[in-house]
Image (spheres, rainbow, N blue to C red):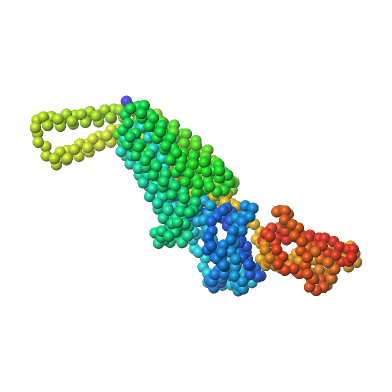
């Protein structure tokens, strides 16, 4: 029968391979501009702020974050200009009402100069975070402290950990997707050696990468030194963490997966009875689904989905997303292996996979849409953050794969059923060989063992070449192989983008941190406000001048001067002051200052509980019956 090519002719393969190369180039460009290990918890505030100059030494340094983090006693270090530790190395959790804040107390009697604050922690989604900033006491000065050049999770250890993450995802795709292809689409594939090797290689890749991540986890989140990989003393701390527990659970589930693979390629592949094989298929499908969902949950319970908004919804959605990715991409890899390495894959098997792939893409799109909304949150974050741009690249690659899949479906519609014919040819060839050997035996011919082995190798090579020639002569099957190969190339890049996405700060978090950094800076040092007043009585007009130092949350020194219109001190009988933070419904907090001299009042250690736009009310009494209350807002950082 003369084959008729689909209408698109020979266009797809070269163009799609070019698109694959272009996607890889774009991915490299994005990664080149990204930090070694962008994290998912962002520093949203500090006291003192970065670059602030305070009049007196603060009692402690506090840091505020966008989400929960894990910190140790040495996670915040405050260094004097000389490099000497200025903190007590006792980190305290100061978070209240959903606010994530940590602080470390400072030694007393600190000298003036520029201080460096260096911090490092692990975010709730398993990624290390770190940073550094400076503030000055009295006035800026030179410092011998050098800020770190790279973030936590970078360097060679960060690179190796990222490679292990990619291998783990790829292994899961091959293991779960290959097994799903056999059970759902091609039962005969359980006995095909290349397919068996593909699935087993997926299991080995997952196991090896999980063990590597366990060993790399300690230095990845702390020192960053490759020499600490074999330091088993750090392993207990890793196992007590959420990520360590997830990795150990993954290893246990991989043990169950090994049993599943043994049954699939053992008892299932050898079973001939139709009813028994159907029952075994059902059992393997249920057991395999449970194991695959459990392995996918080890990612969902320890990474992106486990933190942020709606984690109870995000985690099962993430499991479905990972399963859909594995079934789709792993099925493509298995189909490609079958098309290139096995005798033949039936058209009905390819059609079944086409249906399975369509369902997977639908699930992938639905779950991906939810994940995108959850992690990005706004159109500006979609185009203005690294995470958003990577997400757009991923969507583009999925669209390309769907287009190639449509091409593959067109080839499938013209695919001839040749498996049975090739199988019959192989059986006939085997029978002829058997008859020839039987004749040699009947004739009493003595065959040299070396010669016999050589003839066997030659026959195998001829048979392999013949099968390859027959496959290449099948125009439809060759077209399908090329389109599936293009799908696989795009899938490799897509999986790389997905891996990078899981280690990149989500757009929603980036935008939140950016908004916090874009907020008006807290005043550095004393802040002064002036408020005119008129009590209505004789000598009842004047101006209140109030200063607050350092105008930050915590203890402040307050001075109040009352002046007459000619600028002279006005000795009012009574002055009262209160602070109110309307945004948080805090206050009024009453302050009764002490009279120092005529027209001058003061109060020390005025406690401001948190930064914000505070309303200051001043009540001035100029006689027994004449008084007034005036107010003005003051920014306190």
Left or right: residue 552 compared with residue 8:
right
Q: Is residue 390 visible?
A: no
Quadrant position of the C terminus in the picture: bottom right
Compared with residue 583, is residue 593 higher up or lower down, i.e. above or below? below
Q: Which residue is located at x 35 percent, y 44 percent?
A: 201
Residue 72 point in image, percent of width and height: 53, 60
Residue 371 point in image, percent of width and height: 54, 43
Q: Is residue 259 visible?
A: yes
Q: Which residue is located at x 44 percent, y 49 percent?
A: 247
Quadrant position of the N terminus in the picture: top left
Q: Quadrant of residue 18?
A: top left
The one nearer the camera, 84 or 407, is: 84
Q: Which residue is located at x 33 percent, y 37 percent?
A: 265
Residue 511 point in image, percent of width and height: 59, 51
- Count of numbered tags: 0
Left or right: residue 430 compared with residue 8:
left
Residue 249 point in image, percent of width and height: 44, 47
The one nearer the camera, 488 or 47, is: 47
Q: Residue furthest top?
A: 1
Compared with residue 332, is residue 54 higher up or lower down, i.e. above or below? below
Q: Which residue is located at x 61 percent, y 65 percent?
A: 60
Compared with residue 140, is residue 337 higher up or lower down, i.e. above or below? above
């Amino acid at each position: 029968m003369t084959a008729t090519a689909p209408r698109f002719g020979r266009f797809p393969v070269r163009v799609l391979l070019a698109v694959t190369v272009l996607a890889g180039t774009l991915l490299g460009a994005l990664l080149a501009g990204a930090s070694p290990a962008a994290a998912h918890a962002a520093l949203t505030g500090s006291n003192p702020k970065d670059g602030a100059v305070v009049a007196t030494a603060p009692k402690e340094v506090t840091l505020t974050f966008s989400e929960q983090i894990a910190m140790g006693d040495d996670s915040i270090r405050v260094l004097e200009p000389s490099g000497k530790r200025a903190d007590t190395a006792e980190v305290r959790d100061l978070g209240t009402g959903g606010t994530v804040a940590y602080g470390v107390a400072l030694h007393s009697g600190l000298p003036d100069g520029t201080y460096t604050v260096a911090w490092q922690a692990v975010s709730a989604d398993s990624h290390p975070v770190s940073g550094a900033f400076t503030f000055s006491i009295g006035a800026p000065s030179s410092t011998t402290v050098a800020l770190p050049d790279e973030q936590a999770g970078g360097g060679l250890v960060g690179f190796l950990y990222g490679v292990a993450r990619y291998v783990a995802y790829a292994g899961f795709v091959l293991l779960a997707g290959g097994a799903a292809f056999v059970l759902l689409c091609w039962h005969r594939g359980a006995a095909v050696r290349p397919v068996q090797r593909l699935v087993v290689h997926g299991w080995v890749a997952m196991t090896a990468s999980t063990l590597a991540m366990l060993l790399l986890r300690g230095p990845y989140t702390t020192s960053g030194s490759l020499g600490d990989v074999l330091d088993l003393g750090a392993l207990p701390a890793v196992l007590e963490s959420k990520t360590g527990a997830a990795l150990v659970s993954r290893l246990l589930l991989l043990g169950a997966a090994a049993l599943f693979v043994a049954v699939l390629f053992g008892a299932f592949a050898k079973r001939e009875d139709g009813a028994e094989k159907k029952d075994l298929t059902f059992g393997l499908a249920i057991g395999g689904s449970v194991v695959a969902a459990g392995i996918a949950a080890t990612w969902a319970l320890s990474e992106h989905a486990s933190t942020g908004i709606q984690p109870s919804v995000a985690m099962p959605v993430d499991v479905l997303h990972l399963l859909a990715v594995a079934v789709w991409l792993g099925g493509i890899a298995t189909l490609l292996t079958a098309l290139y390495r096995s005798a033949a894959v039936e058209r009905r098997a390819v059609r079944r996979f086409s249906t399975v792939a369509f369902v997977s893409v639908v699930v992938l799109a639905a779950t991906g849409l939810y994940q995108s909304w959850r992690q990005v949150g706004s159109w500006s974050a979609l185009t203005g953050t690294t995470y958003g741009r990577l997400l757009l690249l991923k969507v583009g690659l999925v669209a390309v794969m769907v287009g190639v899949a449509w091409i593959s479906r067109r080839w499938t519609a013209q695919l001839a059923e040749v498996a049975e014919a090739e199988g019959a040819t192989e059986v006939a060839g085997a029978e002829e060989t058997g008859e020839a050997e039987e004749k040699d035996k009947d004739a009493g011919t003595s065959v040299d063992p070396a010669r016999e082995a050589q003839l066997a190798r030659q026959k195998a090579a001829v048979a392999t070449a013949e099968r390859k020639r027959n496959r290449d002569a099948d125009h439809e099957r060759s077209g399908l192989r090329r389109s599936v190969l293009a799908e696989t190339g795009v899938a490799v890049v897509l999986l790389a983008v997905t891996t990078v996405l899981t280690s990149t700060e989500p757009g929603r978090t980036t935008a939140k941190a950016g908004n916090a950094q874009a907020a008006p800076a807290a005043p550095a040092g004393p802040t002064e406000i002036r408020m005119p007043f008129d009590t209505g009585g004789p000598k009842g007009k004047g101006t209140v001048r109030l200063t607050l130092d350092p105008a930050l949350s915590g203890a402040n020194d307050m001075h109040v001067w009352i002046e007459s219109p000619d600028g002279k001190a006005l000795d009012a009988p009574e002055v009262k002051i209160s602070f109110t933070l309307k945004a948080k419904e805090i206050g009024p907090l009453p302050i009764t200052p002490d009279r120092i001299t005529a027209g001058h009042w003061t109060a020390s250690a005025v406690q401001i509980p948190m930064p914000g736009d505070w309303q200051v009310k001043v009540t001035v009494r100029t006689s027994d019956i004449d008084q007034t209350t005036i107010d003005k807002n003051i920014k306190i950082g």
